[in-house]
Image (spheres, rainbow, N blue to C red):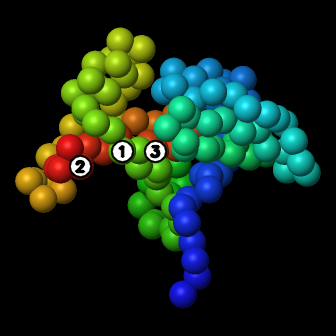
Amino acid sequence: MLDIQAIDHVGIRVFDLATARAFYEKLGFVFIAGPVGPEPVAIMRHPCGVVLNFILNAAAIAEENVLMDVQTKHAGYTHIALQVLDLEAVQRSLNEQSIVITEGPIQFGQAYGASLFIRDQDKNVIEFHQPASL
């Protein structure tokens, strides 16, 4: 077995760095660096330690998310799920910032908790999940 310690970062393809940066700053992420490297990539980090790498090579602004919005189900990563302590507080904050909640809150029962979902500027899905144990 591999000795994996944690997820290091999540890569998200975006069209425009300024727009992506402004959106994710509303969620509490802080710009670290970029564009850097051959792709190029920009890096943002949340105070909780979650790191996002924006791959800055999308050809156009997304009209739909090929993994979520088309009838044919393609293989691939569909969303990032961020664990939160208070889903109701997250919902209030998103509403105050005029960030559209695309689904939820959804209750998954006493065993799993609840979630709500949003989309970023490029239609990438972000889930906020409050586990039942919190």
Q: Which mark is residue 28?
A: none
Q: Percent from the top left, x then y, of residue 125?
A: 46, 44
Q: Secondary structure at mark 1?
A: strand
Q: Secondary structure at mark 3?
A: strand
Position above or below: 75 against 17 = below
Query: Which quarter of the rendering shows the N terminus?
Result: bottom right
Give the residue at the far bottom of this rendering. Answer: 1
Q: Which mark is residue 83?
A: 1
Q: Secondary structure at mark 2?
A: loop
Closest to the observer, 26 or 4: 4
Three-letter amino acid code of the residue under disc 2:
Pro
| Quarter residue 106 falls in | top left
* Residue matched to label 3: 125
Position above or below: 19 against 116 = above
- Does the residue at mark 2 contact the one at mark 1 (Cβ under 8 Å)? yes
Q: Percent from the top left, x then y, of residue 38?
A: 91, 51
* Residue matched to label 2: 131
Mark 2 residue crowding within 10 angstroms, few (<14) / some (14–19) / many (20+): some
Closest to the observer, 131 or 47: 47
C-alpha distance separating marks 2 and 1: 7 Å
Three-letter amino acid code of the residue under disc 3:
Val
